[in-house]
Amino acid sequence: MSTDHDLTTRGPQLTVLHLLRLKGFAAEDLIVRDTELDAAVVQDLLRQAQSDGLIAERSGRISGWALTAQGRTTHAELLAAELAESGAKPAVEHANTTFLELNQPFKELCSRWQMRPDGSVNDHGDQTYDDAVVADLGALHEQVLALTDEVAQALPRFGRYPRAFRRAYERLLSGDRKAFAAPLSESYHDAWMELHQDLLSTLGRERAAADGH
């Protein structure tokens, strides 16, 4: 599939393909919600992408859409064109560097949230212990918001991340323990993993040892 049409034309298509790259798999209603595109537009884009061999539908207990091998190639081409035309590469490079500086501290916070210092599983029965971990996340949270707000000024599609991190953090403060690190629950950790993949994909890189997990 050619990527020689302009960025305005490519925008909605890239938005949908990019979400599928980050999520791995997504149902239509989630695509509509997270892309903030009109439902009819999303339906048309999905039908066209399927016709072009870029995505495939999975059915079963959970149904949804995922990129094909060709879809991943086309997505990478679209991202590269977007980055070149936007002039945002220095900002994304800086964001990636800052992210890697915060990655290890965040991983340590997740470990503390899940395990006690003695190696036992944290059953969240000790409110004082949990509050201390959340307080430490709060300090890192401000740096995460600064990082994502800054890169979103250069490449507006990153604007979804400040909102996602704020929502997860507010849920955590309100007592929702899943909002910290529970997988597939729109947790802080979920947003963290998506941001990491987004930075790597935008820069056209594969995950390496220096990137952590």
Image (cartoon, helix red, strand yellow):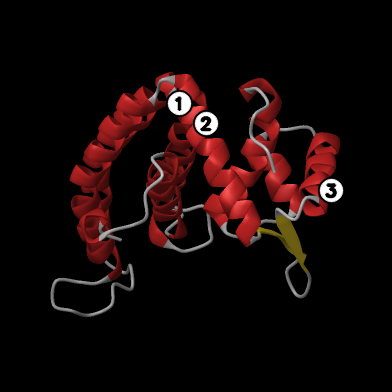
Res 81 label: 2
Q: Which residue is label 3 attached to? A: 47
SS at mark 1 in the image: helix
User: Which one is closest to the eye, mark 3 or mark 2?
Assistant: 2
The residue sitting at the bottom extreme is: 120
The mark nearer the N terminus, 3 or 1, is 3
Find out whether the residues at labels 2 and 1 contact each other: C-beta distance under 8 Å: yes
- Locate the C terminus by quadrant: bottom left
The mark nearer the N terminus, 3 or 2, is 3
Residue in the image at 79% along x and 53% along y: 50
Query: Residue 5's image quarter?
Result: top right
Residue 128 visible, this angle: no
**Spot occupied by residue 75 in the image (x, y as percentages of width and height):** 58, 45
Mark 3: give few (<14), some (14-19) or many (20+) Cα within 10 Å: some
**Spot occupied by residue 69 in the image (x, y as percentages of width and height):** 61, 61
Res 84 label: 1
Residue in the image at 21% along x and 55% along y: 210
Find out whether the residues at labels 3 and 1 contact each other: C-beta distance under 8 Å: no
Find out whether the residues at labels 3 and 2 contact each other: C-beta distance under 8 Å: no
User: Which one is closest to the eye, mark 3 or mark 1?
Assistant: 1
SS at mark 2 in the image: helix
Q: Amino acid at mark 2?
A: Ala
The vertical placement of 117 against 186, above or below, is below
Q: Amino acid at mark 3?
A: Arg
Q: CA distance from mark 2 to mark 1?
A: 5 Å
Res 145 label: none
Residue 188 visible, this angle: yes
SS at mark 3 in the image: helix
**Spot occupied by residue 120 in the image (x, y as percentages of width and height):** 22, 80
